């Protein structure tokens, strides 16, 4: 499941801010309630002690009128629910209900008699419907108990203050959540913009297109990521350009082998068997002297363009373009038993392609050329020849020289292969032999047997 960066940041902000706000609200609620009750108890107990002294004598005399007169001072007292005076036997001697109609005296007496008898100096059981606190104190005369005074008060006025504080706290909490929301939006936008640009750039890079991503204005880890991505993308494009350039000179399998094994790209070489194919235009010097330079280049490109695709199809490598000729190698970077057969098959298809192209050019009124081919197999030194700044992956040695000498003996349209190549091709796959020759080319100290195919 995909979750946007904004919701992740906002959720984290709430996770950080919400628990402290919730815990703070709970603690504040309990603290206010406890302090309210303690304050009510402290304030009213002092008042009850003063009232109990003034009630002692009327209570001893059974003077109900005097008791009621003393209680009348609470007629308009804030928060007082009721006041009751009991004699030593628990009989009701006087009561006052400042703010509501009196309940049944029997039920009141029952409630008072069932109150905690241990509340000598102010325990306060609470009845939830009225948020009431019952405070009880003894009435004494010369140290002797003569009755009890019970004061029931409501903490509703104080709860209103508590509610106001709670609402203020919730307002502050809501403001904090709003700030977290706004901060999350800003931070998500700040972080997501370069990330989206990196994503888009990566998608373009997959398609072979790339333009550097602009780093954020404020340098941070995101800008480091953008810088690293730009560097990586440039390296990838550079490598891709090198691969494309490499693929123009060697077959794809050779290019992939060199890319996967870059350790092979070093000065020096190894002794390895390979098939060397040379092809060259016959009488090219005479032809080029009669044509404009543009026409000469057009002729070469038209033929070489078709040749190179064929060479790659037969797993060969165009090792060198020598003006009007090509040097093609089969067996690099790894020689396979099928390479002699593939090399000969490639030469045969190249000749057929030359005939087709020449026929088309003659029909179009354009000049055409003929090629001669020479192939040989042997061991040579395979490696990167040159300097550290400019190297050529090639084969050198007697096998290359012999293949070149054989090609020079070929007439227009002829393919000459050495005896060594013919013997390496299974009999059922050998090409048709048109002729057999013995050559003694310059630079070779023995006679060469070659076959015209």
Image (tube, rainbow, N blue to C red):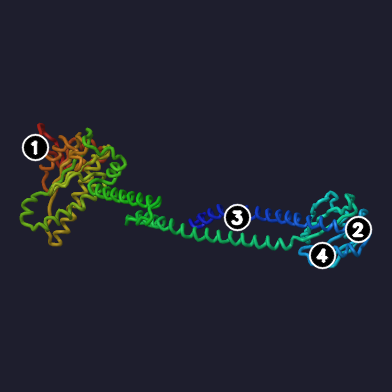
Q: Marks 4/3: CA distance?
A: 44 Å
Of circles 2 and 1, the one toward us is: 2
x 89%, y 54%: residue: 147
Residue at the extreme front: 142
Q: Which of the marked residues, 4 or 3, is nearer the chain's N terminus? A: 3
Image coordinates for residue 329, horizontal then vertical, percent? 21, 42
Mark 4 or mark 1: whose residue is earlier in sequence: 4
Residue under label 3: 21
Query: Camera-side residue: 353 or 12?
Result: 12
The residue pinned by badge 4 equals 73
Nearer the camera: disc 1 or disc 3 = 3
Q: Secondary structure at mark 1?
A: loop
Q: Secondary structure at mark 4?
A: helix
Which of the two labelled residues, at mark 2 and mark 4, occupies the earlier sequence position?
2
Callout 3 environment at 10 Å: few (<14), some (14 to 19), or many (20+)?
some
> Mark 4 and 3 residues: CB-CB less than 8 Å, in contact?
no
**Which residue is under mark 2?**
59
Circle 2: element type? helix
Which residue was labeled with disc 1? 441
Which dot, 4 or 1, sits closer to the camera?
4
Separation of residues labelled 1 and 3 (CA atoms): 99 Å
Q: Is residue 139 left or right of residue 133?
A: right
Q: Nearer the viewer, residue 168 or 84?
A: 84
Q: CA distance from mark 2 to mark 4?
A: 17 Å
Above-or-below relation of 313 to 298: above
Contact (CB < 8 A) between labels 4 and 1?
no
Residue beneath the point at 64% across and 62% down: 167
Q: Quadrant of residue 259?
A: top left
Tell me which label, 3 or 2, sits earlier in the chain. 3
Q: Residue at x 11, y 39 (%)?
A: 405
Q: Nearer the viewer, residue 412 or 200?
A: 200
Q: Nearer the viewer, mark 3 or mark 2?
A: 2
């Amino acid at each position: 499941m995909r979750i946007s960066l904004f919701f992740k940041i906002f959720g984290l902000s709430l996770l950080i801010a919400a628990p402290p706000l919730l815990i703070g609200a709970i603690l504040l609620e309990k603290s206010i309630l406890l302090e309210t009750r303690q304050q009510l108890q402290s304030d009213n107990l002092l008042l009850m002690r003063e009232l109990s002294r003034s009630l002692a004598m009327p209570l001893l005399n059974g003077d109900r009128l005097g008791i009621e007169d003393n209680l009348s001072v609470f007629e308009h007292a804030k928060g007082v629910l009721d006041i009751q005076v009991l004699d030593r036997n628990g009989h009701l001697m006087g009561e006052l209900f400042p703010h509501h109609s009196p309940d049944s005296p029997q039920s009141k007496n029952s409630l008072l008699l069932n109150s905690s008898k241990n509340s000598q100096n102010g325990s306060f059981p609470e009845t939830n419907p009225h948020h009431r606190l019952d405070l009880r104190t003894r009435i004494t005369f010369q140290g002797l108990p003569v009755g009890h005074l019970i004061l029931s008060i409501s903490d509703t006025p104080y709860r209103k203050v508590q509610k106001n504080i709670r609402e203020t706290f919730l307002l502050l909490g809501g403001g904090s959540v709003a700030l977290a929301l706004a901060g999350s939006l800003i931070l998500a936008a700040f972080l997501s913009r370069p990330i989206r640009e990196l994503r888009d750039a990566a998608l373009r890079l997959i398609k072979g297109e790339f333009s550097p991503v602009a780093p954020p204005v404020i340098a941070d880890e995101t800008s480091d990521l953008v810088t690293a991505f730009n560097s990586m993308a440039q390296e990838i494009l550079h490598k891709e350009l090198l691969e494309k350039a490499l693929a123009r000179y060697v077959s794809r399998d050779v290019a992939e082998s060199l890319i996967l094994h870059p350790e092979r790209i070093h000065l020096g070489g190894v002794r390895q068997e390979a098939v060397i194919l040379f092809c060259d235009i016959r009488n090219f010097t005479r032809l080029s002297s009669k044509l404009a330079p543009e026409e000469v280049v057009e002729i070469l490109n038209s033929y070489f363009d078709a040749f190179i695709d064929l060479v790659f199809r037969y797993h060969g490598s165009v090792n060198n373009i020598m003006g009007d000729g090509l040097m093609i190698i089969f067996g690099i970077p790894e020689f396979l038993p099928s390479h002699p057969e593939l090399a000969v098959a490639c030469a045969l298809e190249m000749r057929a392609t030359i005939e087709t192209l020449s026929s088309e050019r003659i029909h179009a009124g354009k000049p055409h050329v003929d090629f001669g081919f020479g192939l040989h197999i042997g061991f040579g030194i395979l490696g990167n020849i040159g300097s550290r700044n400019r190297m050529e992956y090639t084969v050198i040695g007697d096998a290359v020289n012999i293949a070149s000498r054989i090609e020079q003996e070929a007439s227009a349209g002829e393919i000459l292969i050495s005896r060594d190549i013919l013997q390496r091709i299974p009999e059922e796959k050998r090409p048709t032999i048109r002729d057999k020759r013995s050559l003694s080319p310059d630079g070779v100290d023995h006679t060469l047997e070659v076959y015209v195919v």
